[in-house]
Image (cartoon, rainbow, N blue to C red):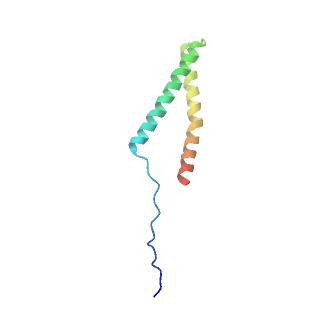
């Protein structure tokens, strides 16, 4: 009767979930930074002599390009973090 006691198997732990409050703070910071970037872009366009409607349109298309490039990178990185 010299048997070792088997340790009970511990179920694998789930990855800790972000709190909703933390997620809201993150997205608030993201929106604030994009808004600041848009405002600075408009100001720069006006400062360098573009007419007002062109300045706003160029700033909008610039920010749209930035978002279209960064969004897939963000989701790819998030997926990579979760799978690690």
For image coordinates 44% across by 34% down, the residue present is: 28
Q: Give x and y (percent) for residue 32.
A: 46, 29
Task: Identify the residue at horizontal 58%, vertical 41% (top origin).
Answer: 73
Q: Residue furthest front?
A: 2
Residue at figure coordinates x 56%, y 30% from the top left: 64
Residue 17 at what x, y percent from top left?
Answer: 43, 50
In front of the other: 15 or 50: 15
Residue 77 drawn above or below residue 68? below
The residue at the far bottom in this view is 1
Q: Position of residue 19 (x, y in %)?
A: 40, 46
For the N terminus, the quadrant is bottom left
For residue 27, which quarter of the picture? top left
- Name the one closer to the observer, 55 or 78: 78
Direction left: furthest residue: 21
Image coordinates of residue 30 in percent, x first then y, are 48, 34
The mark total stands at 0
Depicted 2 relative to depicted 34: above or below: below
User: Can residue 56 be spotted in the picture?
Assistant: no
Quadrant in the picture for residue 25: top left
On the rendered image, what quadrant is the C terminus found in?
bottom right
Residue 7 in view, yes or no: yes
Viewed as shown, does residue 23 lie left or right of 41?
left
């Amino acid at each position: 009767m010299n048997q070792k006691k088997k340790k009970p198997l511990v179920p694998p732990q789930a990855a800790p979930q972000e709190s909703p409050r933390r997620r809201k703070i993150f997205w608030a910071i993201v929106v604030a930074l994009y808004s600041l970037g848009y405002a600075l872009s408009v100001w720069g366009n006006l400062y360098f002599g573009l007419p007002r409607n062109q300045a706003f349109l160029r700033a909008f298309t610039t920010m749209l390009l930035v978002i279209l490039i960064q969004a897939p990178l963000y989701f790819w990185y998030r997926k990579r973090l979760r799978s690690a």
